[in-house]
Image: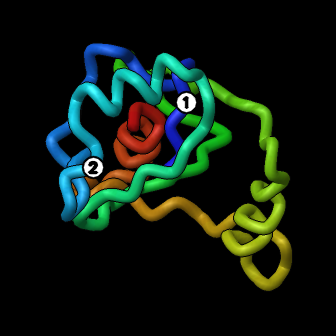
């Protein structure tokens, strides 16, 4: 793990800093941050990291926010969702709704 001063708060001290030989004490972390150089600090146990990539997201209020597709992945995803004729598949009716008008209204409010 690379650590540099701009990306770390000087008050953040995770318990997983210590290596098997105790090399990364609080003082060592603070000293390293003060040097403002990037160093490698290995964790004793692996730390799971979950990386996601969204070019659109829904806010808490339901507003959809579009972001630039920096990695140009949307095209492949959209193509994968299209049917053999290049059309978007029809939306399935909402669960528990049999009336088409009611289903359309429920889908529109999702």
Q: Is residue 64 visible?
A: yes
The residue that appears at 78% across and 33% down in the rendered structure is 68
Classify residue 106 as left or right of residue 25.
Answer: right
The correct choice, above or below, for 25 with respect to 27 in the image is below
- Which residue extends farthest bottom? 84
Classify residue 74 as left or right of residue 22.
Answer: right
Expressed as whole percent of the image width and height from the top left, the position of residue 85 reads 84, 79
**In which quadrant will I find the C terminus?**
top left
Query: Mark 2 = which residue?
Result: 23
Secondary structure state at the residue bearing disc 2? loop
Q: Earlier in the sequence, mark 1 or mark 2?
A: 1
Expressed as whole percent of the image width and height from the top left, the position of residue 52 reads 52, 51
Query: Mark 1 = which residue?
Result: 4
Report the Cα–Cα distance between label 1 and label 2.
17 Å
Q: Nearer the viewer, mark 1 or mark 2?
A: 2
Expressed as whole percent of the image width and height from the top left, the position of residue 26 reads 22, 29
Q: How many marks?
A: 2
From the viewer's side, name the closer residue of 73 and 27.
Answer: 27
The residue that appears at 19% across and 52% down in the rendered structure is 22
Expressed as whole percent of the image width and height from the top left, the position of residue 10 reads 35, 15
The residue that appears at 81% across and 42% down in the rendered structure is 70
From the viewer's side, name the closer residue of 64 and 48.
Answer: 48
Q: Answer few, some or many: residues within 10 Å of disc 2's Cα (few below 14, many 20 plus, some between 14 and 19).
A: few
Q: Is residue 98 visible?
A: no
Secondary structure state at the residue bearing disc 1? loop
């Amino acid at each position: 793990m690379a650590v540099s001063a701009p990306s770390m708060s000087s008050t953040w001290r995770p318990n997983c800093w210590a290596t098997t030989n105790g090399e990364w004490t609080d003082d060592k972390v603070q000293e390293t941050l003060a040097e403002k150089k990037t160093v490698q600090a290995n964790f004793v146990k692996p730390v799971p990291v979950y990386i996601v990539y969204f070019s659109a997201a829904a806010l808490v209020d339901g507003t959809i926010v579009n972001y630039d597709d920096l990695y140009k992945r949307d095209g492949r995803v959209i193509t994968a969702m299209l049917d053999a004729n290049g059309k978007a598949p029809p939306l399935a009716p909402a669960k528990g709704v049999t009336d088409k008008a009611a289903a359309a209204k429920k889908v529109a409010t999702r």
